């Protein structure tokens, strides 16, 4: 169903596929995390933190947990000391990459307009 078909039929945007999509990838950091994981996975937590820079450890941790709960990120923990954890994209997240590419193309075309 397209966005136009939902117009006037639902009272809450969260009840639409668009609302679901926003709940999974919305916010300041989730698309950045997905982008960085798509570029070079698997990635360790501290490497992600270093690449993003201005994100706090607490926020990065919560965003990764939310992405994991939504089936977008897989977390692999190695039984060693010190602990080693790597993050990578799931197949579900991989299906989103063409959409993110289109968003980047839109940015390229419209950034300086």
Image (cartoon, helix red, strand yellow):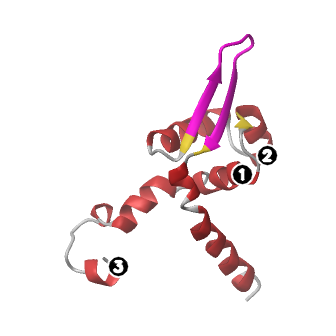
Residue neighbourhood size for the residue with mark 3, other residues' Cα within 10 Å, grouped as few (<14), some (14–19), many (≥20): few
- The residue at which mark 1 appears reads as 36
Quadrant of the rendered image containing residue 58: top right
Front position in the image: 69 or 91: 91
Q: Is residue 16 left or right of residue 22?
A: left
Marks 2/1: CA–CA distance:
8 Å
At which x and y percent is residue 44? 73, 33
* Residue occupying the far bottom of the picture: 113
Residue 85 lies within the magenta run: yes
Residue drawn at point x = 52 percent, y = 36 percent:
65
Nearer-the-camera pick, 22 or 84? 84
Between residue 79 and residue 23, name the one nearer to us.
Answer: 79
Q: Is residue 6 left or right of residue 38?
A: left
* x, y percent for residue 56: 67, 38
- The residue carrying mark 3 is 3
Element assignment for label 3? helix
Quarter of the image holding residue 70?
top left
Please name the residue shown 60% across and 39% down the image.
59
Q: Does the magenta-highlighted stretch encompass residue 60?
A: no
Binning the other alpha carbons within 10 Å of mark 2 as few (below 14), some (14 to 19) or many (20 upward) gives few
Q: Compute the Cα span from label 1 to label 3.
A: 29 Å
């Amino acid at each position: 169903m397209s966005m136009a078909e939902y117009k006037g039929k639902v009272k809450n945007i969260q009840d639409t596929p668009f609302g679901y999509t926003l709940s999974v990838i919305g916010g300041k950091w989730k698309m950045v995390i997905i982008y960085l994981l798509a570029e070079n996975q698997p990635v360790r937590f501290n490497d992600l933190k270093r690449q993003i820079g201005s994100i706090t450890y607490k926020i990065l941790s919560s965003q990764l947990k939310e992405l994991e709960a939504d089936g977008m990120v897989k977390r692999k923990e190695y039984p060693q000391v010190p602990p080693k954890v790597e993050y990578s994209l799931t197949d579900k997240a991989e299906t989103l990459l063409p959409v993110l590419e289109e968003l980047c193309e839109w940015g390229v075309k419209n950034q300086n307009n």
